[in-house]
Amino acid sequence: MDPMSSYSWLVFALGTVLTWGLYGIFLHMGQMGMVDPVNGRYKAFLFVGVAYFLTAVLAPLALLIMRGSDWNFPSKGLWLSLFAGILGAIGAFFVLLALGAAISAKVQNAPGVVMSIIFAGAPIVNAIVSISMAHDWSRIRWPFILGLLMAAAGGFLVTMFKPVHAPPAKPADKVVAAPSVPQDQGPQSH
């Protein structure tokens, strides 16, 4: 077995960390780039949908065709996958709403704050739901609880103590001196 193949999961997980870490920043920039305070977030979300179509519909469709897949989609897998996609799309929409609300509330570095809360909170939700679905609550050890508390504390600390850049300095009022006008000295001889 190739030693690198045992780490491919980590490479892909870090790829997700990178892309989702950039997601909120670029989504915010796209929303602002629409230059539409009323509908900019919906316009941005429309293009998120276009991007999902390109990456999540056309790309796997091409892969399925190239690999000669059968076109059997068992009902359970189909509906659970569809539900997962709906959750992802709703989450993306909530990101946009959160960014808009944070900007309206004049939160400094809104994308950083919003995404820090999301990325600290999502693993906690994932852990609680996964353990509940597996009925593993009796197997919980203290380091797991400590990890949950640290994730929550990390999200709080990043949000509350993020560096805040100072607003741009206002240019000092320049005192413009009136141009000097030569006083009339009478007729001049040359």
Image (cartoon, helix red, strand yellow):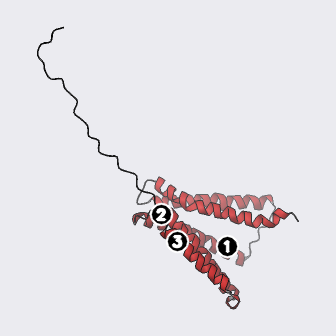
Does label 3 or label 2 sit earlier along the sequence?
2
* Local SS, label 1: helix
Between label 3 and label 2, give the one nearer the viewer.
3
Which residue matches tag 1?
81
Q: Amino acid at mark 2?
A: Ala
Q: Amino acid at mark 1?
A: Ser
Left/right of residue 1 with respect to residue 29 in the rendered view: right
Does label 1 or label 3 sit earlier along the sequence?
1
Mark drawn on residue 157 = 3
Residue under the image location 58 percent in, 61 percent down:
23
- Rounded to the nearest whole Å, what is the CA distance between mark 3 and mark 2? 15 Å
Quarter of the image for residue 131 reads bottom right
Cβ atoms under marks 3 and 2 closer than 8 Å = no
Left/right of residue 12 with respect to residue 186 in the rendered view: right
Which residue matches tag 2?
110
* Local SS, label 3: helix
Mark drawn on residue 167 = none
- As displayed, is residue 102 above or below residue 173? below
- As displayed, is residue 189 above or below residue 155? above
Residue under the image location 71 percent in, 89 percent down:
139
Between label 1 and label 3, give the one nearer the viewer.
3
- Rounded to the nearest whole Å, what is the CA distance between mark 2 and mark 1? 31 Å
Q: Amino acid at mark 3?
A: Leu
Cβ atoms under marks 1 and 3 closer than 8 Å = no
Disc 1 crowd, CA 10 A, few/some/many (<14, 14-19, 20+): few
- Residue furthest to the left in view is 186
From the image, which quarter does the C terminus lie in? Answer: top left
Q: Is residue 126 visible?
A: yes
* Local SS, label 2: helix
- Rounded to the nearest whole Å, what is the CA distance between mark 1 and mark 3? 34 Å
- As displayed, is residue 82 above or below residue 179? below
Residue under the image location 54 percent in, 66 percent down:
115
